Amino acid sequence: MILLVGLGNPGKRYADTRHNVGFAVLDEVVRRAGGGPWRDKFSGQFADVEHRGHRILGLKPETFMNDSGRSVRAGATFYKVVPADVVVVHDELDLPFGVIRLKLGGGEAGHNGLRSVTAELGTKDYVRLRVGVGKPPAGFRGGGAEFVLQAFAPAERAELDGIVGQAANAVELVLDQGLEHAMNVTNRRTG
């Protein structure tokens, strides 16, 4: 059993932004596993599904990014999921667009959602599935925080479904063959 968390912000305003790529990946994993249903739970949207005999507790916190950890802690506590079995899918400015990386633990790299999850779980030792959204292009007015709240460019949008699919494959690999194998395959496959 894993608690699979997609980080993002609730509401239409943020639906297609870079910051919500975690929601998109979680939606794809849940869709592949039979589709839910989604329900309100743990200050978020929650789905309990199965993939090849593995239980996936899917959670999209609706607390807004900076307070995501509160929702994650509530779900982990209720289901007694240890941090090593929490998988957080999030956008990553420090990776080029489309590059996907899996890792256990590490820093937050300025990501307020990760900072909140770490604070609420009391450890950095949870799994992160990092989905590269790239850095702001030359001439972009604003910093990284403003950039991730922008919609994907049309050329990026055309590639996004494939990237979301690759990230969902990485989650399934974690379940099917373990984190170490999934890291080896995923981290070698993209970028």
Image (cartoon, rainbow, N blue to C red):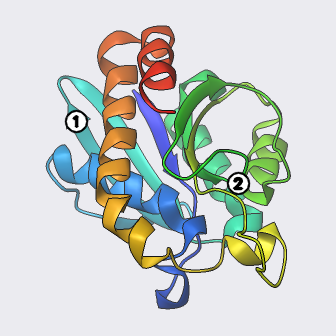
Question: Disc number at residue 99?
Answer: none
Res 50 label: 1
Tell me the residue at 47%/89% (across/down): 12
Say whether residue 81 is visible: no
Looking at the image, residue 45 lies above or below residue 10: above
How many other residues sit within 10 Å of disc 1, few (<14), some (14-19) or many (≥20)? some
Q: Position of residue 66 (x, y in %)?
A: 77, 66
Q: Residue at x 60, y 66 (%)?
A: 19
Q: Position of residue 151 (x, y in %)?
A: 53, 79
Q: Position of residue 105 (x, y in %)?
A: 73, 26
Which of marks 1 and 2 precedes in the sequence?
Answer: 1
Label 2–label 1 contact, CB within 8 A? no
Q: Which residue is identified by label 2?
A: 93
Would residue 10 be found to the left or right of residue 107 on screen?
Answer: left
Secondary structure category for the residue under label 1: strand
The amino acid type of the residue labelled 1 equals: Glu
**Residue 185 coordinates in the image, percent (x, y):** 41, 17
